[in-house]
Image (tube, helix red, strand yellow):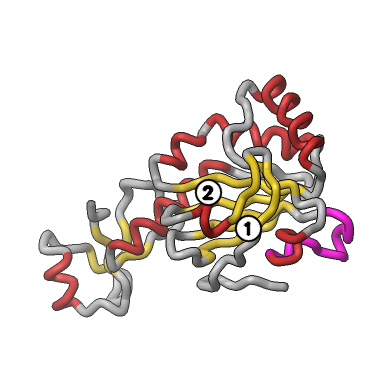
Amino acid sequence: MTLQLGEIAPDFTVESTEGTLGFHQWLGKDWAVLFSHPADYTPVCTTELGAFARRKDEFAARGVKLVGVSVDPLASHHDWAEDIKQTQGAALNYPLLADADQVVAQLYGMIHPKADPKVTVRTVFIIDSDKKIRLTLTYPPSTGRNVDEILRVIDSLQLTDKHKVATPVDWQNGDDVIILPSLSDDDAKERFPEGWNAKTSYLRVVRQPD
């Protein structure tokens, strides 16, 4: 199954390190980052789970919940959590799904047979408060995910949902943004009365709105 941007993230109910988790009910009106791991006790994923735990407050400040998933059973997750705490200096502080029956893995297309038919690939889903999928990223086993990039994308998505703008290459929160081409100059004047820098008729650079 291939999930596309804009689709409703599939609901599920599975066990987790924080009890039984019904995804849509747990999500409520928050955003979520759902990220999968091929197996417990994998070294790259151990560093990632610790990094997300250390930076949980940064996600919470944006109204974003964290949830991990692995196809290993719950008892293994709890044991792995001890390794994460010991080696990464942060205890697991968000749910890790025990997807032993591959319910979530199948719903979200996390099993890639040509990579490995038995384990999940390392995928990131950013899901908004309407439960729509807004971004997907899939990483190879050898490359750790970048937490800063995931936060940057969330900042961009939340900003551009609120204003008629897009964020350019390498944008960071606070940088200039681009007025959407669909917005006429007359309408843009109402939204951005301080004006903008027109590089071309379609590339209009403006200060990031509040």
Question: Is 199 displayed left or right of 121 in the figure?
Answer: left
Image quadrant in which you'd find residue 146? top right
C-alpha span from label 2 to label 1 = 9 Å
- Residue drawn 46% across the image and 42% down it: 59
Residue beneath the point at 43% across and 59% down: 129
Q: Viewer-proximal residue, 54 or 164? A: 54
Label 1 residue SS = strand
Task: Check residue 137 in the rendering and tell me which mark sits there, or answer none.
Answer: 1
Q: Residues within 10 Å of mark 2 (few under 14, many from 20)?
A: some
Q: Secondary structure at mark 2?
A: helix
User: In the rendered structure, which amino acid carries the disc numbered 1?
Assistant: Leu
Q: Is residue 94 above or below residue 6?
A: above
What is the x, y in percent for residue 104?
Answer: 71, 59
> Where is 116 relative to 53, above or below?
below
Tell me the magenta residue range: 108-119
| Residue occupying the point 81% across, 64% down | 112
Which residue matches tag 2? 150
For the N terminus, the image quarter is bottom right
